[in-house]
Amino acid sequence: MKRREFLGTAAALLASAGLPGRVFANTDVSVGYTTVSDAAYLFSAVEQGYFGKLGLDVVPRFIPLNPSLPPAIQSGSLTVALETPSVFLQSVDGGLDHVVIAGAAQLSKGTTGAGFVATEASGIKTAQDCVGKTIGAPGLGALLHVAFRKWLRQNGVDDTKVKFVEAAFPQHNDLLRGGSIDGVVTVDPFMGRIVSSGSGRLVSHFLAELPEGMPTLVFVTRRDWAEAHPKEVKAFQQAIAQSAEFVADAANDKAVREQLGKYIKLPPPVLATMEINPPSPSITVEQLNHWVETMAEQDMLKSKPDLSKLIIS
C-alpha cells in the first residue's frame, strides 16, 4: 500500500475511534525513538498538534539503539517506545509484560531505503561472500539484523558463520572507512552517505525481499500503564491515525520532511531523498506473526507468543 493510497483507510480508522476532541486533562507521555525515517509518523503527530488536541503532552526522546527501548519502558524512563517488532517480541519472550498500542509503517516490495553495503576491500558481492566476515547492525535482534539474517538464509548462507557487531547508524561510515568491519546493514541517509563517499558499495536492498505488509515499527508500552490509562491509549491511537493520514498525503511531503529533520537533525538535501514506508497505524495478529515465524526460524524465541493478547486495539 503506497502512502497516498492510505488516505481512505486512515479516515475510516478515525471515524471508528469515536473519540471527542479532548477526552481528559493533559497527560505527559515520553516516547522513545531511534534515527529512522519511519519515526515521521510520531513527529508529525506532535508537530501537527494531534496529540495536544486530545490532551496528550507527548515528548519524543532520542535513544541511540532500539534494544535499549524495552528496559527504558520497564524502568519508567519512557512511557511509550517506537520499537522494531523483533525487539518487542524478544522483550516479551524474555518476560516483560509489554503490549503494542499502535503501529507506524510497513514494508512494501518497493522498499529501497535500507540495504546492505560492504567495503571494496571485503570482496563481498553476494550473500555467500559474507561467511567469515564482520557485519555491523544497528541493534542485535532489531529489525535490520533479523531481516538480514533471513536474507542470508534465503540465499543458502549459514548466518551463524557471520560475525555481527552492534553499531549505531551514525557510526557506520567511520567504521567502514576504518576497516574494523566489512559491511553494515543500514538505512538512508547513512546508506547514501556511505556509497557517495566511497566507504562502501551497495550489495542488496534485502528488505524488499520480505513479505509486504510486515510492520517496521510499533508503539509499545507496559501493560499496566495501558490498562490504567485506557482513554490515553485511545487518544494516542487516534493521533497516530491522524498523523498517518497527514504523512500519506503527498501534498504534505515537504512539511513531513521538515518535521522529520527537526528530530533527527539532518540537512534538507538528505531529508529530501529519505524513504518513508507506507503507514500502518493499526497492527494485526497476522502482521506480527510474520515476525514471529521469522524469529522462530532463527531460534530467537523460547515459545510462541499469544499475539491476540499483545495488541491493544
Image (cartoon, rainbow, N blue to C red):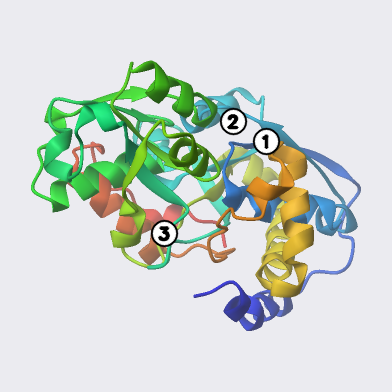
| In front of the other: 220 or 126 | 126
Give the residue pinned by disc 3.
Answer: 308
Q: Residue at x 66, y 31 (%)?
A: 62
How far apart marks 3 and 1 lie (CA) works out to 22 Å
Q: Residue at x 43, y 47 (%)?
A: 85
**Helix, strand, or loop for circle 1?**
loop
Q: Quadrant of the C terminus?
A: bottom right
Residue 90 place in picture, x, y as percent: 36, 36
Residue 312: tell me if it is visible. yes
Tell me which corner region of the image, top left, top right, bottom left or bottom right, holds residue 45: bottom right
Density class for disc 3 (Cα within 10 Å; few <14, some 14-19, many ≥20) is few
Give the residue pinned by disc 2.
Answer: 73
Residue 17: tell me if it is visible. no
| In front of the other: 71 or 130 | 130
Give the residue pinned by disc 1.
Answer: 79
Tell which circle, 1 or 2, labels the residue nearer the N-terminal end: 2
Q: Residue at x 36, y 66 (%)?
A: 286
Tell me which corner region of the image, top left, top right, bottom left or bottom right, holds residue 299: top left
Residue 81 place in picture, x, y as percent: 60, 39
Q: Amino acid at mark 3?
A: Ser
Q: Amino acid at mark 2?
A: Ile
Q: Are marks 1 and 2 in contact (CB under 8 Å)?
A: yes
Q: Residue at x 45, y 65 (%)?
A: 284
How far apart marks 3 and 2 lie (CA) works out to 21 Å
Label 3 or label 1, whichever lies nearer to me, is: 1
Residue 305 place in picture, x, y as percent: 32, 48
- The relative height of residue 300 versus residue 251 in the rendered view (above or below) is above
Q: Amino acid at mark 1?
A: Thr
